[in-house]
Image (tube, helix red, strand yellow):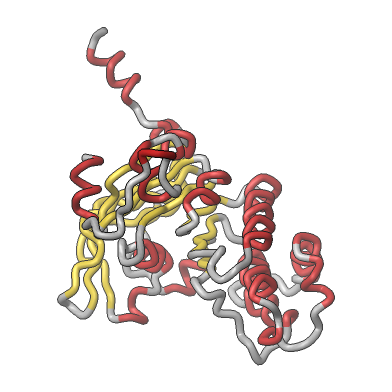
Amino acid sequence: MDGTAAAKVQQRWVDTLPALLEVNNVEVVYNDVILVLRGLSLKVPQGHIVALLGANGAGKSTTLKAISGLLKTEEGEITRGDILFAGERLNGIDPDRIVRKGIFQVMEGRRIIADMTVLENLRLGAFTRSDGDIRRDIEMVYGYFPRLKERTGLAGYLSGGEQQMLAIGRALMARPKLVLMDEPSMGLSPLLVKEVFGIIQRLNKDLGITILLVEQNARMALSVASYGYVMEQGKIVLDGTAEELANNEDVKEFYLGGHGAERKSFKNLKSYKRRKRWL
């Protein structure tokens, strides 16, 4: 086998498709001192769901904030590397302009406006749009989340699952090309988790929305994703198709609840041991 043929064999699935989002060797520092992302790189192909997995503190939410321009709200900044969306560099662009370019982040913990109604929250999601008629999109959101149409009171009285639906619906109102989802299963019952992830999958298939999904429920995330990345201490230590990661013995052990009799506890293991093992 010659060098060209070998390169084709080794080419990753994610590199064979047009990338809507590219994060290239990015470092993020908080308060001019704390280095959180340490040369992170990933790609999100157009029209696909990509999962970003990792333990608490790995830097997953920081990655999303770097993409959406929200680092400034927490005294963070990108000190090295580039973030490209549809080939355009996003570094230093204000969050509202990033939303107008087609990126919307569904924040961890929903972050709906509790003292506004469901309808007012949905209208808020369209604040960057220049067209005046948003009624059709509101009906579209109600089509995916019929329970929201029944809730006419303040959003603060919604259940946790309904608040998550509202947060996703609010994102749809911006007509995004890319949605960044941060822990959509947090605080939800297993039944609601299944329902929410089913809707995420439908939005991707029906509307063609590209999704970068940060999620601790690795099993559920890999069930809807095409590709996935595993983060440890601000770096990507493993990536592959969802099927490859779901069948990886280390991913099974540390993120999917073990693998039968050989399952090991990782409660007392340091993350660098997993990184060394993967690398």
Vertical order, 153 against 84 (above or below): below
Residue 241 higher or lower than 276, as above or below: above
Q: Residue at x 28, y 16 (%)?
A: 6
Q: Measuring from the top left, give residue 140's x and y in whole percent.
A: 78, 62
Q: Is residue 25 above or below residue 12?
A: below
Residue positioned most to the right? 150
Q: Quadrant of the C terminus?
A: top left
Residue at position x 29%, y 56% in the image: 82
Left or right: 255 in relation to 184: left
- Residue furthest out toward the front: 261
* In-image side of 51 versus 59 (left or right): right
Q: Residue furthest top?
A: 1
Q: Which one is nearer the viewer's eye here, 104 or 134? A: 104
| One can see residue 101 in this view | no
Please tell me whether residue 39 is drawn above or below residue 247 in the rendered image.
Answer: below
What residue is drawn where x is 26% and y is 7%? Answer: 1
Residue ranking furthest to the bottom: 115
Work out whether residue 87 or residue 218 is closer to the camera in this orientation and state it. Answer: 218
Residue 144: x and y, percent? 76, 60
Figure disc tally = 0
Q: Residue at x 40, y 50 (%)?
A: 255
Q: Position of residue 152 (x, y in %)?
A: 81, 83
Taking the image as shown, residue 274 lies to the left or right of residue 100, namely left
Q: Nearer the viewer, residue 170 or 182?
A: 182
On the image, which quarter does residue 155 sit in? bottom right
When asked about the image quadrant of residue 159, the answer is: bottom right
Would residue 184 be seen by someone viewing this image from the given angle?
Answer: yes
Percent from the top left, x then y, of residue 266? 30, 54
